[in-house]
Image: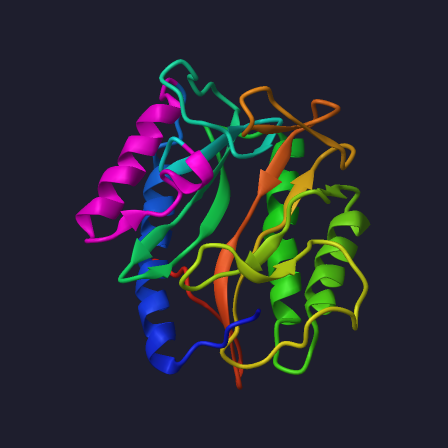
């Protein structure tokens, strides 16, 4: 069932979003050659706790860390490790969020260690912009498929592929709520968007083919062809005046 939030509930989600966004920014700033993914996870974990919130990924479905940290061809759900050292030119996707007074924030971004290759930078730029293409369609009266179609069209026009097995979602008191928000689909289809709906829109984009494979750890998901992958996510609320991003560090 899709839940519509009150103004007070949205204010609480905005604070959860602010904490989530600052945690993501701190994690992104730590992406440098020589740093381990576990060190980045600790920075995120400690910051979220310092704000009187809880890392909402920690323990979720059994996940062992406060952030999913996915390097290069890892699409999502990479488990941070003391043994995984980041190297020059790596692209690092970080997905994290905070639970604050019973309400969730959720966001992700892909960061570069040092200088990115032109291909990697273009992948990150297209993935980021595809979110904003979808955001333009997140207005009351439209349907979820309008968001999905806008993302897919932009990504594919730029020669990249949208991951199909994993999608965006509603969020609120639960991190994952209805409706699902795929990054592909048909305009005019899906749930009707109304003011007060809160969504996490999160394109996951591969430089090569769309196919992915899950690792034996049961979490990490890599591109099947070994191509690079990027991830960009923000939590939003639909208002009568248009969409507003809740995961805003300011």
Please tell me which residue lies in front, 157 or 161.
161
Residue 49: within the magenta?
Answer: yes
Figure quadrant of the C terminus: bottom left
When the figure is inspected, residue 233 is found, relative to residue 34, above or below; the finding is: below
The quarter holding residue 163 reads top right
Residue lying at 31% horizontally and 61% vertically, measured from the top left? 102
Residue 239: within the magenta?
Answer: no
| Name of the residue lying farthest toward the top | 83
Percent x, y of residue 181: 64, 59
Which span is picked out in magenta?
34-63
When the figure is inspected, residue 18 is found, relative to residue 113, above or below; the finding is: below
Number of numbered callouts drawn: 0
Percent x, y of residue 162: 73, 45
Please tell me which residue lies in front, 24 or 212.
212
The quarter holding residue 137 reads bottom right
Percent x, y of residue 2: 56, 71
**In-image side of 91 versus 102 (left or right):** right
**In-image side of 91 versus 160 (left or right):** left
Which color mode does the image show?
Answer: rainbow
Percent x, y of residue 135: 60, 66
Residue lying at 65% horizontally and 45% vertically, measured from the top left? 166
Figure quadrant of the N terminus: bottom right
Whether residue 250 is visible, yes or no, is no
Whether residue 93 is visible, yes or no, is yes
Please tell me which residue lies in front, 111 or 101.
101
């Amino acid at each position: 069932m899709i839940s519509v939030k009150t103004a007070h509930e949205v204010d609480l989600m905005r604070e959860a979003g602010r904490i989530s966004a600052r945690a993501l920014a701190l994690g992104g700033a730590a992406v440098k050659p020589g740093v381990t993914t576990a060190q980045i996870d600790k920075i995120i974990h400690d910051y979220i706790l310092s704000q009187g919130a809880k890392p909402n990924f920690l323990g979720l479905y059994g996940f062992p860390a406060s952030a999913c940290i996915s390097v290069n061809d890892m699409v999502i759900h990479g488990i941070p490790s003391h043994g995984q050292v980041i190297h020059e030119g790596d692209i690092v996707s970080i997905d994290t969020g905070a639970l604050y007074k019973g309400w969730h924030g959720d966001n992700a971004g892909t960061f570069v260690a040092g200088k990115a290759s032109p291909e990697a930078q273009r992948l990150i730029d297209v993935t980021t912009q595809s979110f904003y293409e979808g955001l333009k369609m997140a207005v009351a009266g439209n349907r979820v498929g309008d968001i999905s179609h806008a993302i897919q069209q932009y990504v594919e026009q730029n020669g990249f592929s949208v991951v199909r097995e994993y999608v965006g979602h509603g969020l609120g008191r639960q991190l994952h709520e209805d409706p699902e928000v795929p990054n592909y689909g048909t305009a005019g289809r899906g749930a009707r968007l109304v003011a007060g709906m809160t969504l996490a829109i999160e394109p996951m984009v591969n430089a090569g083919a769309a196919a992915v494979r899950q690792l034996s750890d049961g979490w990490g998901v890599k591109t099947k062809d070994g191509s690079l992958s990027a991830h960009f996510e923000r939590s939003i609320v639909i208002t009568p005046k248009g969409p507003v991003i809740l995961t805003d560090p300011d």
